[in-house]
Each structure stands twice: as C-alpha cells, then as structure tokens.
Image: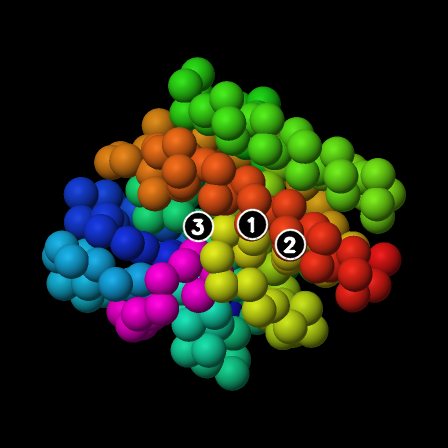
Amino acid sequence: MKICVIIPALNEEKSIGRAISAIRESLQNLSLEHEIFVCDNGSSDNTSTISRSNGAQVINAPVRGYGSACLAGIAALPADCDIVLFMDADLSDDARDASGLLNPLIYNRADLVIGSRPLLAVPGSLTFVQKFGNWLSTYLIYRIWKYRYSDLGPFRAIRYSALLALKMNDLNYGWTIQMQIRAIKQKLRILEINVHYRRRVGVSKISGTIRGSVMAGMIILRTIWQELRVNK
C-alpha cells in the first residue's frame, strides 16, 4: 500500500520543514510506503529549498490557486500510488491524525475520508468566517444532494483510482467542495472523522484577509452552482 502525500504550499518556509517531518514520522510509524510531494504555488521564499532538504519532491505549480497546486501534484503522482493524502503546509493539520484518515481506506471501508475540524479545533484556529462558510456550504450540499457533511477540511485521504474518476478541475478555493460534491455524485463511500486543528504558522492567504475570505466564499458558492448545473 503506497501513500502519496500532496502538500500545496505558497511561501511556507517557516513551517514546511516541520510539516514534512511530522507527516513522514506519522507514516513511518504506520510502516507505510510513501512519497511526499510539495506543490510550490509560486513561492518567493525558501519553501522549495527547505522541502527538498527534507526529502520531499517539489512540484512546480506556477498558476496560482489551491486547486491548481493540487492538480499539479496529482499529475506528478506515480502509477503505483494507492492512496492520496492531502494536507496543508502551515502546521494547522496534526499529522498524528493521518492514521485515522488512512485506515478506513487501507481496510477498504471507505473511498474518501474527510478530516472534520470543528469538534477538536483549538479555540481561535477557525475564524468566524470559516465557521460560517463551512456551515453554509455543508447546509447547501445537504439541501441539494441530501448528504450531510460537517466540514470542508483540507486534511483528507482518497483512493487514487477514485480521485482520478472525479475528474477534478477546480483551480482555486472551490477544490475541497468540488471533491466532496463529486464524491456524492460518484456514489463513493464517504467517511468523516474528527481531526485536531491548530492555529496556523503565518497568515492565511484566504481567511487571513477580508478580501480573501470574500473571494473564497464567492468561489465556493460558484462551485456549488456549477456542480448543480452539471447534474444533481
């Protein structure tokens, strides 16, 4: 069973080395074969250099956008990849939760496992805008597709074959919700588990600014509309 870790990153030199070390340690403790791919989304700092020095493969993803970085990582995955694990580069995700995300896939109990943050999030790690956006998005998914999620958390694992079948194409902040909606449409076996969530290192490119929060919200709503138009 081979695990491929995709870590989108943009100017994360203060955290990326520790993030790589943490997820490697977690996967080694599980005795899992793995490769780590850092998808550099146009960093102007030492993110790429630090990633390579910590043993990760660096994938150049010059077109800005969270989804664009993830797609660049998927394009670089080896053919023998079994499970893809997505996590953030800012240390907000706790790599020790990786086993909870991976085990349902390893033991064939799920095709997609989402890390749900609200229950175990450190106070202040999720902003009001994030909480409201997650509530609204998951509520709309339930109303339209009759599946109840609790979060759009970035820490998630999916079977590689299932990921390819979703034909992901969102280039920006709609990536996570597009995956979750398309997983429902594809009738994947979906599971949510509670994961820890910490205050990130550095300033968020999305929730850290009013403009970023508004843009993310608009893109997420647009993604819901697009997926609704394609097929309920």
Is 139 above or below relative to 9?
above
Q: Quadrant of the N terminus?
A: bottom right
Q: Which numbered dot is residue 17?
A: none
Question: Which amino acid lies under the numbered mark 1 shown in the image of this protein?
Answer: Ile
Residue position marked by numbered label 3 in the rendering: 87
Decide whether residue 60 is among the magenta residues: yes
Marks 3 and 2, the one that precedes in the sequence: 3
Label 3's element? loop
Q: Nearer the viewer, residue 157 or 105?
A: 157
Q: Is residue 98 visible?
A: no
Residue at x-position 70% and y-position 51%: 224
Label 1's element? helix
Residue position marked by numbered label 1 in the rendering: 219
Q: Nearer the viewer, residue 42 or 96?
A: 42
Q: Quadrant of residue 141?
A: top right
Question: Which amino acid lies under the numbered mark 3 shown in the image of this protein?
Answer: Met
Q: Are marks 2 and 1 in contact (CB under 8 Å)?
A: yes
Instruction: State the image coordinates of residue 189 (x, y, percent, origin top left).
Output: 77, 55
Q: Which numbered dot is residue 223?
A: 2
Crowding at label 2, few (<14), some or many (≥20) Cα neighbours within 10 Å?
Answer: many
Marks 1 and 3, the one that precedes in the sequence: 3
Residue reaching furthest bottom? 79
Label 2's element? helix
Q: Residues in magenta?
A: 57-68
Residue at x-position 41% and y-position 25%: 125
The CA distance from mark 3 to mark 2 is 21 Å
Q: Quadrant of residue 123?
A: top left
Instruction: State the image coordinates of residue 86 (x, y, percent, origin top left).
Output: 48, 55
Decide whether residue 28 is among the magenta residues: no
The CA distance from mark 2 to mark 1 is 6 Å
Residue at x-position 36% and y-position 68%: 63
